[in-house]
C-alpha cells in the first residue's frame, strides 16, 4: 500500500475576494441611499386627542412645545423669539417641507399660537398641530 501525500488547500493562492468586497460596498451604498431617518424633537410630549385627527405625511420641520413652556427644535431648546430664524434656516434647506407642532396637551395655548405664527412668518405654507387619533 502506497500512501499519497496530499497538500492542504491553499486559500491565498486561488481565491479572489475582490468581487465579494465590491458586492458588500454596493449593498452598503444601496441601504444608505434608500434608508429614511426619523427626525425627533428631543423631548417627549403628551399630545392631545382629537376625533378628526388625520394621518399626514412626514413633516420636515418638527417643533415641540412642552407643558413647562419650553420650545424644542432639532433636539435643542430654543426661545420662542428665535423660532422664526430656526424655521427659516430649515426651510431654506428643504423648501418643500411642512412644519408640525408637537404641543403637549397641558401647554399654554398662547405659546402654541406664537410658535404657529412664527412658523408661518418664516414662510412655511403648511403648518399643522399634532394630535393623537381618538379611539
Image: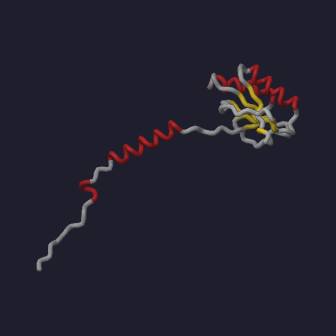
Residue 29, position as x, y percentages in the image: 46, 39
Q: Is residue 44 above or below residue 122?
A: below
The residue at 88%/29% (across/down) is 110
Residue 79, position as x, y percentages in the image: 80, 31
Colour treatment of the image: secondary structure
Q: Is residue 4 above or below residue 80?
A: below
The residue at 38%/44% (across/down) is 23
Quadrant of the frame with the N terminus? bottom left
The residue at 84%/27% (across/down) is 113
The reply, left or right, for residue 15 in relation to residue 124 is: left
**Depth order, front residue of 70/124:** 124
The reply, left or right, for residue 73 in relation to residue 110 is: left
Quadrant housing residue 60:
top right
Quadrant housing residue 12:
bottom left
Q: Is residue 92 above or below residue 132?
A: above
The residue at 76%/37% (across/down) is 77
Residue 41, position as x, y percentages in the image: 71, 38
Amino acid at each position: 500500500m502506497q500512501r499519497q501525500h496530499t497538500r492542504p488547500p491553499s486559500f491565498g493562492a486561488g481565491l479572489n475576494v475582490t468581487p465579494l468586497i465590491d458586492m458588500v460596498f454596493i449593498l452598503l451604498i444601496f441601504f444608505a441611499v434608500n434608508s429614511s431617518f426619523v427626525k425627533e424633537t428631543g423631548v417627549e410630549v403628551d399630545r392631545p386627542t382629537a376625533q378628526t385627527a388625520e394621518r399626514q405625511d412626514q413633516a420636515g420641520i418638527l417643533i415641540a412645545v412642552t407643558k413647562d413652556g419650553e420650545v424644542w427644535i432639532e433636539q435643542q431648546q430654543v426661545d420662542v423669539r428665535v423660532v422664526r430664524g430656526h424655521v427659516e434656516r430649515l426651510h431654506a434647506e428643504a423648501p418643500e417641507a411642512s412644519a408640525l407642532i408637537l404641543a403637549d396637551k397641558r401647554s399654554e395655548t398662547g405659546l402654541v399660537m406664537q410658535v404657529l405664527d412664527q412658523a408661518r412668518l418664516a414662510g412655511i405654507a403648511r403648518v399643522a398641530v399634532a394630535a393623537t387619533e381618538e379611539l
